[in-house]
């Protein structure tokens, strides 16, 4: 991979980066849990998510072709963008009698790339723990790399836990007909994170190099209980209650990080 390979036609490799980002908090009452979900819905509505994805497209140096967005009832939002490596020239409008464009001429410039985001706010029915999950997919082909967007996306949300998956799919051919299944060196997703992000998180890698599949889990190291209380301050609880809340929050975060439930 040190020297450039001359390709036969377009680079057909698909590079997919998927995120699951979790924000955890404690909301003491049913009213506060509802207020938390309402806050999340307002903070990360379809309009705000559209702006975040627009910034992502700019960071990876792509161009937006189409946007679809939706706020859901009772909770959540989604945004999907079709993107291209090259800017698409504007259509020429004409009223003259002539055939319209053929399908091949419409899709020939598309790189089959997209960016999507979905949000999922929810709360525990008993212990007051509320979670907000964001699912993000950045899938590109051609010269565009989704890895450029890593740091921006992690810092765009209150990220207590992050699950990252990166995979290169398919193959592309060189001029001699030889297939290539990856076009860049990578040993870990962690290498694409800024030093301050690496220092802030406990991280675990599970990589399958022969399949060009890379997985990184991230758990925020610093825990300050006052940052996790929604609607009330520490002074509103006694010491015993605070200890219980902290224990429940940390267990929730550990369970999500390791993808399994622990005994109480």
Image (tube, grey):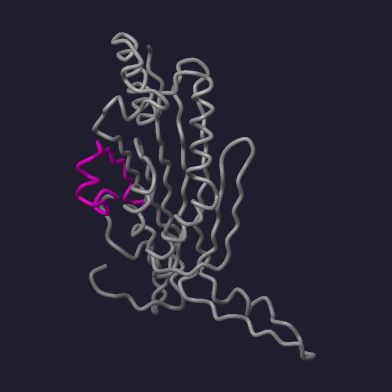
The residue shown at (37%, 25%) is 229
In terms of depth relative to the viewer, which is nearer, 66 or 140? 66
Measured along the vertical axis of the image, is residue 49 above or below residue 105? Answer: above
Which residue, as the protein is rendered here, is positioned at the far right?
Answer: 97
The residue shown at (48%, 43%) is 43
Residue 57 covered by magenta stretch? no
The residue shown at (35%, 44%) is 215
In terms of depth relative to the viewer, which is nearer, 233 or 47? 233
The count of marks equals 0
Numbered range of the magenta stretch:
189-212
Q: Position of residue 159 (x, y in %)?
A: 36, 40
Measured along the vertical axis of the image, is residue 217 above or below residue 189? Answer: above
Q: Position of residue 231 (x, y in %)?
A: 42, 26
In terms of depth relative to the viewer, which is nearer, 178 or 65? 65
Which residue, as the protein is rendered here, is positioned at the far front?
Answer: 235
Q: Position of residue 185 (x, y in %)?
A: 27, 60
Residue 191 covered by magenta stretch? yes
Side of 175 where 197 appears, left or right: left
Q: Position of residue 1 (x, y in %)?
A: 27, 67
Q: Quadrant of the C terminus?
A: top left
Q: Quadrant of residue 224?
A: top left
Side of 177 where 93 appears, left or right: right
């Amino acid at each position: 991979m040190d020297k450039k390979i001359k390709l036969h036609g377009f680079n057909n490799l698909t590079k997919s980066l998927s995120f699951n980002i979790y924000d955890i908090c404690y909301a003491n009452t049913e009213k506060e849990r509802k207020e938390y979900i309402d806050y999340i819905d307002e903070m990360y509505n379809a309009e705000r998510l559209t702006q975040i994805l627009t910034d992502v497209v700019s960071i990876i140096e792509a161009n937006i072709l189409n946007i679809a967005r939706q706020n859901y009832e009772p909770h959540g939002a989604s945004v999907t963008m079709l993107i291209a490596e090259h800017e698409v020239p504007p259509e020429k409008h004409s009223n003259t009698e002539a055939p319209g464009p053929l399908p091949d001429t419409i899709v020939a410039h598309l790189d089959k790339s997209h960016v999507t985001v979905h949000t999922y706010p929810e709360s525990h029915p008993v212990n007051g723990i509320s979670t907000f999950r964001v699912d993000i997919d950045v899938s590109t082909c051609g010269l565009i790399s989704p890895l450029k967007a890593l740091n921006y996306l992690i810092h765009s949300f209150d990220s207590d836990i992050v699950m990252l998956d990166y995979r290169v799919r398919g193959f592309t051919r060189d001029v001699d007909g030889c297939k290539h299944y990856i076009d860049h060196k990578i040993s870990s997703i962690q290498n694409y994170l800024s030093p301050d992000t690496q220092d802030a998180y406990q991280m675990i890698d599970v990589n399958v190099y022969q399949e060009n599949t890379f997985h990184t889990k991230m758990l925020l190291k610093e825990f300050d209980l006052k940052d996790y209380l929604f609607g009330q301050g520490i002074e509103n609880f006694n010491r015993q209650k605070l200890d219980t809340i902290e224990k429940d929050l940390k267990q929730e975060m550990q369970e999500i990080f390791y993808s399994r439930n622990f005994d109480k």
